[in-house]
Amino acid sequence: MSIEQIIFYVFATILVVCATLVVTLRNPVFCALALVLAFFTSAGIWIFLEAEFLALTLILVYVGAVMVLFLFVVMMLDINLTVLREGFTRYLPLGLVVSIVLIAELVMVVGPGQLGLESMPVPIPHPEGYSNTKEIGSVLYTEFLYPFEIAAVILVVAIVAAISLTLRRRSNTKVFMKPEEQVVVRRKDRVRLVKMSSESNND
């Protein structure tokens, strides 16, 4: 077994363990940290496939920006961890069934005889001057333009939904702020100048 195969299996094992922790851990912050490690190991595997642009994008965009937004959303939603622990075992059988179905679909798509590092051919070395960015852009904005635009719309809807959840009315808050009233506020509605005569302090 070569050193490349050893590194691949190590990264693949870490990736599977981290993906399992993302689903099984009950603390959302720990789930986000496990997902960060899964992104890093996925980037390492993509580098072996000579997909350097995708690997760097996964680290810079998802780990550097998207995961930070995930943590902000988790903190702003004020998730009750006790409620999450109560319903975990109830949905475990359904989760196992869905996982088995997804694994079966992946095997059917890839092919039973195409699993494993031995069945995959070694990537052909690209000549000097080859650009992964150019190749991805030419395919993404020609053949997959509509799926790309649909994914962008779905992300916008998800952002709007996250913002709406953070602005919901809560029973444990004393004052509920209305943004539409805050943006139209005027100075004379908030500040009042009072003129008072000075008093002399005679001892």
Image (cartoon, helix red, strand yellow):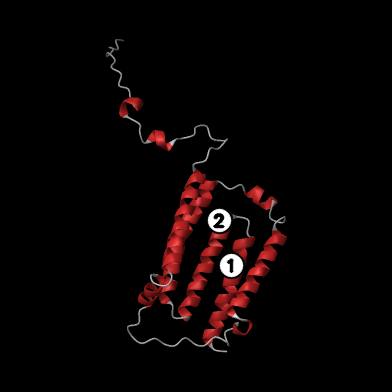
Asked which quadrant contains residue 114, the reply is bottom right
Q: Is residue 193 above or below residue 7?
A: above
The C terminus sits in image quarter: top left
Q: How many other residues sit within 10 Å of disc 1, few (<14), some (14-19) or many (≥20)?
A: many
Q: Residue drawn 32% across and 22% down?
A: 192
Q: With 176 as the anchor, is 171 left or right in this view?
A: right
Q: Residue furthest top?
A: 202
- Residue 10 coordinates in the image, percent (x, y): 57, 78
Asked which quadrant contains residue 101, the reply is bottom right
Q: Which mark is residue 18?
A: 1
The amino acid on which the numbered mark 1 sits, given as a three-letter code, is Cys
Find the distance from the CA under tag 2 to the CA under tag 1: 13 Å
- Residue 95 coordinates in the image, percent (x, y): 67, 62
Q: How many other residues sit within 10 Å of disc 2, few (<14), some (14-19) or many (≥20)?
A: some
Q: Residue drawn 37% across and 74% down?
A: 138
Q: SS of the residue at dot 1? A: helix
Sequence order check: which comes first, mark 2 or mark 1? 1
Asked which quadrant contains residue 65, the reply is bottom left
Q: Report the front residue among 62 and 158.
A: 158
The amino acid on which the numbered mark 2 sits, given as a three-letter code, is Val
Q: Report the front residue among 136 and 15.
A: 136
Q: Is residue 24 above or below residue 105?
A: above
Q: Is residue 91 above or below residue 125?
A: above
- Residue 55 coordinates in the image, percent (x, y): 44, 73
Q: Which mark is residue 181?
A: none
Q: Which mark is residue 29?
A: 2
